[in-house]
Image (cartoon, helix red, strand yellow):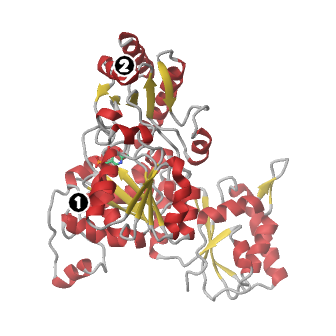
Amino acid sequence: MNAQFDIHRQIAEQIADAVIHTDAEGTIRGWNAAAEVLFGYSRNQAIGQNLDLIIPERLRAAHWAGFNRAMARGMTQHGSRATVTRSLTRTGEVIYVEMSFAVVTDHARKALGAVAVARDVTQRELAERQWRQSLAKAGVTDTSSPGLATRAIHGGTAKDAHGSPHIPIYNTTTFAFASTADLLDVVDGKKPGSLYTRYGLNPSIHALEETLASLESAEAAWAFCSGMAAQIALFLTHGREGIVCLGDAYGGTLELLSSHLPLLGLRTHLILGTELDQLEPLLAAGVRLVFFETPTNPTLEVFDIRAIASMAHAYGATVAVDNTFASPVNQRPLELGADFVMCSATKYLGGHSDLTAGALMGSKDLLAPVWNWRKNLGSMLSPETASLLARSLRTLVVRVRQQNASAQAIAAAMAQHRRVARVCYPGLPGFSGHELAKRQMHGFGGMLTIEVKGGGKAATAVADHLRLFALAPSLGGAESLVTQPCTTTHHGLTSEERARRGISDAMLRLSVGLEDPADLIADLNQALAAAS
Ligand SMILES: Cc1ncc(COP(=O)(O)O)c(C=O)c1O
């Protein structure tokens, strides 16, 4: 058994779309082609290879008989020595076939991506399969790729021993073992288990991390006591060969990159969206970590994750995206080619302005060295906060979708307002990043920035007259907030630097909460009128 045929499921499904299709009458066609590919594949395969055939949702059981017939024909025609070792297990939208191959041709491997993902059936997959089956039993049909709202609630595999529907708070600092051998298994990472909370080896933290990973389509996630803690652990681990930060960023990030990290000897480069031509020379000179927010804070500039990742990868660099503004509901950078997603969970993930936390997601390999930095920097969040955050994640999708809709309505209203000079919002058709946002985001987010006519003083007056929007620097909570970046997030920059970054004193950044959007628009209208 080997794992050389581990073709990414998403690619397999995409190509499957091309091979198996619905004709004008709505009949599913292409089973023969699929079976052909399958049997081509089966000629040169290692003995005993298992194969999972993953079939998109639209190819339902009604068409299954057609595939079986084509299989039988193909077996005879090609003299294949593939045998179906287990017939079909259908779990929701995924139909699994396990086959044992005598031989499979190598050339057919790529084509096989058209219909199948072949791989060893590992323990993890078996667990995943069981989990899918239990979802299917519970009547959840979208099991081939669980929807995000489902993942927000069922995304982890951790189960409570007493049947609690969520993992309760283990406010424990250390965990006892039956024997030294058992302890060493966990210390040496041979077995999963709880050990010491600062290490993250605590059930409440582990359960949270599984859900975070699932939401960002990541292999793994590490939780932290703040977004900045996640960021510094990333930079110290993967930024030692230089970091380039693209575009605007949170003020604390800019301070860390421009003042603190250089003191430790780390080379950092800050280039704006208008200076992207400087990225490739920096990569060529050996910079190995590209970091950026998208959409950015506070101008909502949108960067092309796929394009930047492909350029960085060509030079052997990795890409980290601060996904705080978008949240995984609106954007999943790893699916677009990024290597890390960093998030201030204090914002949308927490969603109620009542916790401070951070998260870093990515592949197990890339995250592994970050673990030791987190451990020794002592930047673990408490089990109480982990539990509160896990609770919040359960409602993330409904919250953020509502915030998207409200922000869109407010942006449209503000774009018409005679006292507003400009609205920065990726959902507005006239906005510079709109087309790109449409391609890479699933929603445009709950953050927007308006530029008030009359300059900084006028903007301050509007902020001071708002009643529902609270004057506070954070974002992503249930309550709407307003902040004037020059007085808060970007106060630490010189006015020249703010101007260079396109951050004017007349800007007000709005974090749209969950109040009725009509009330929020009325609040903005009265404040704009009162301030004039
Ligand atoms: C985009 C962004 N990234 C990172 C951070 C830092 O997060 P935290 O305050 O959780 O440390 C913030 C905080 O405002 C932010 O807005």
What residue is at 71 percent from the left and 84 percent from the top? Answer: 104
What residue is at 42 percent from the left and 55 percent from the top? Answer: 155
Which element carries disc 1, helix, strand or loop? loop
Question: Label 1 to label 2, Cα distance in Å?
Answer: 42 Å
Which amino acid is tagged 1?
Answer: Met
Task: Locate the C terminus by quadrant.
Answer: top left
Nearer to the camera, 266 or 21: 266
Horizontal relation, residue 492 to residue 410: left or right: left
Horizontal relation, residue 26 to residue 2: left or right: right
Q: Is residue 40 visible?
A: yes
Label placed on residue 458: 2
Give the quadrant of residue 219.
bottom left
Q: Residues within 10 Å of mark 1 (few under 14, many from 20)?
A: many
Give the quadrant of residue 434.
top right
Does mark 1 have its CB less than 8 Å from ligand 1? no
What residue is at 31 percent from the left and 16 percent from the top? Answer: 465
Q: Position of residue 424 (x, y in %)?
A: 50, 33
